[in-house]
């Protein structure tokens, strides 16, 4: 097969027997659920664009394992060009869906594991990389969506995994068998979990020797026995249950996150990619996080949609010529393109690792993600400034359609001549959706905490910024000659 159509992707999800709960009830038809469906449609775009000749160059790649054409989301980066295309692909999909399209976490997990398994084998003579490559060939051949599951619930943050009062606060091995391992625990905030065929589990922090039961990585089919998904709520989520489409903001797409519970889940050895090599847990976390920080190219694409919506709202209001409105839109573009610089730069400065996989520049990937924790908030603030208060005080679509009050809504919320009131409300609902509705989960809160909260990037920036070299240059230019021994002692 090697590449699925979007229709085949949706059909393949129907065959899964996932245990999903939402609002306290089991969801029996996940694919048709009106709240989940828009998130599945967003993932489906990663398939349909790959079939579109216009986007073939960005959306597909040649497998280094089989030489076959594959979806880029299952590809292991073989060049700097691949890394740059990955960033461009993220912006493209964000700009088409206006939301989180979820498939990047799996791509980032696959690429990180392609390096970590190789590095573990080199030190310990294990055979994880060979196992992993067999698994990768399966993922590529079946064109699967993988959920990259890293974030554990973590319990008491002051305690390491082995000292938690509840040992399941970090996912861990509870039994070792001849044919595999049994694991328990959970992964929280999992993007796209119920739209995935596979769950790839990785440790969430650097583990010490005492925590080696927690230093594990593996992959399981998403409907493996013992796995339960509990869907996260999003602001305005039940608008998707209402008749009509206007109040949803985004007509077609959305994202989702879920808590994934692993209750005594069996994993065969052939799907285990790290087993108690605690000294490589931090390595895997850092590699996955750096790739995923690059992946926040998606926010640039969503920013494109938001800027387009704001310009439209300004025109509908007759305000687009006001100098402060023009200046605010310039500022939004400036911030958005600055974000784009970061995700392109960390890719363009990427390098080849010993495994052959190309890896982003980690300092620049962290700087990019740090900008992502800030700029979308400022872009959203400017968007709300230009949109005006109607974005949050506007009556519902049902009122607009009401035989009693519809005429008043149309009359009093009309703006520029010739612009239907409905169009004005629709564009404001889209701005609401991205800055405070369902899509704000991805555009704002995930920008803050996804791929690591801001402090995680600051720690990396402090580590990687090579401050000593900068000091040496400064001192040399200033004519400072130091007694090296005295400085070392100090
Ligand atoms: Fe991909 Fe962005 Fe969603 Fe993360 S937030 S999965 S990078 S689209
Ligand atoms: Fe994310």
Image (tube, rainbow, N blue to C red):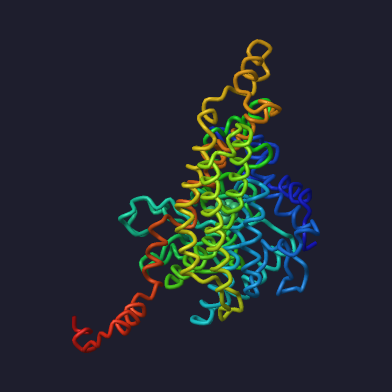
Residue drawn at 67 percent across, 61 percent down = 73
Instruction: Where is residue 463? Give x, y as percent.
Output: 38, 71
Which quadrant, please, contains the N terminus? bottom right
Q: Is 458 left or right of 293, judged from the image as shown?
A: left
Instruction: Where is residue 52? Give x, y as percent.
Output: 79, 56
> Is residue 236 or residue 327 the one in the foreground?
327
In the rendered image of this protein, does residue 262 appear above or below residue 458? above
In the rendered image of this protein, does residue 421 appear above or below residue 353? above
The quarter of the picture where residue 221 lies is: bottom right
The quarter of the picture where residue 467 lies is: bottom left
Q: Is residue 192 visible?
A: no
> Is residue 124 or residue 68 the one in the foreground?
68
Residue drawn at 69 percent across, 44 percent down = 41
Q: Is residue 489 visible?
A: yes
Instruction: Where is residue 301? Give x, y as percent.
Output: 61, 52
In the rendered image of this protein, does residue 456 appear above or below residue 479? above
Q: Is 416 left or right of 48, judged from the image as shown?
A: left
């Amino acid at each position: 097969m090697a590449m699925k159509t979007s229709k085949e992707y949706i059909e393949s999800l129907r065959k899964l027997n996932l245990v999903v709960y939402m609002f306290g009830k089991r969801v029996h038809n996940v694919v048709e659920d009106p709240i989940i469906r828009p998130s599945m449609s967003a993932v489906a775009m990663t398939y349909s664009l790959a079939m579109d000749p216009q986007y073939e160059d960005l959306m597909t790649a040649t497998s280094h394992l089989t030489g076959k054409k594959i979806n880029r989301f299952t590809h292991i980066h073989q060049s700097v060009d691949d890394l740059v295309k990955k960033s461009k692909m993220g912006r493209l999909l964000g700009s088409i869906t206006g939301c989180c399209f979820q498939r990047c976490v799996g791509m980032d997990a696959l690429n990180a594991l392609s390096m970590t398994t190789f590095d573990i084998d080199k030190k310990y003579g294990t055979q994880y990389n060979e196992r992993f490559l067999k698994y990768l060939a399966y993922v590529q051949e079946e064109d699967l969506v993988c959920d990259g599951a890293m974030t554990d619930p973590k319990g008491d943050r002051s305690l390491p995994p082995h000292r938690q009062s509840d040992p399941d606060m970090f996912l861990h091995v509870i039994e070792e068998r001849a044919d595999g391992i049994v694991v328990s625990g959970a992964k929280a905030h999992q993007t796209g979990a119920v739209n995935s065929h596979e769950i790839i589990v990785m440790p969430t922090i650097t583990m010490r020797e005492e925590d080696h039961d927690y230093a594990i990585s593996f992959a399981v089919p998403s409907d493996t026995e013992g796995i339960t998904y509990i869907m996260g709520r999003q602001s305005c989520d039940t608008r998707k249950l209402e008749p009509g489409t206007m109040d949803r903001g985004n007509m077609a797409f959305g994202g989702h996150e879920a808590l994934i519970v692993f209750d005594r889940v069996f994993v065969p050895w052939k799907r285990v990619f790290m087993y108690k090599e605690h000294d490589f847990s931090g390595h895997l976390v850092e590699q996955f996080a750096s790739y995923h920080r690059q992946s926040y190219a998606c926010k640039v694409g969503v920013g494109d949609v938001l800027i387009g919506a704001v310009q439209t709202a300004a025109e509908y209001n007759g305000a687009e010529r006001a100098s402060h409105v023009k200046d605010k839109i310039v500022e939004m573009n400036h911030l958005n393109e600055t974000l784009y610089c970061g995700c392109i730069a960390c890719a363009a400065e990427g390098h080849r690792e010993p495994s052959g996989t190309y890896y982003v520049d980690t300092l620049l990937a962290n700087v990019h993600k740090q900008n992502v924790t800030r700029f979308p908030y400022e872009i959203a603030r400017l968007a709300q400034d230009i949109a005006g208060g109607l974005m949050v005080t506007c009556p519902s679509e049902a009122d607009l359609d009401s035989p009693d009050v519809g005429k008043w809504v149309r009359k009093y919320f009309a703006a520029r001549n010739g612009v239907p009131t409905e169009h004005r409300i629709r564009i404001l609902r889209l701005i609401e959706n991205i800055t405070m509705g369902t899509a704000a989960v991805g555009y704002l809160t995930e920008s803050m905490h996804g791929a690591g909260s801001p402090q995680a990037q600051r720690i990396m920036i402090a580590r990687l910024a090579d401050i000593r070299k900068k000091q040496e240059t400064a001192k040399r230019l200033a004519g400072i000659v130091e007694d090296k021994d005295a400085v070392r002692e100090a």
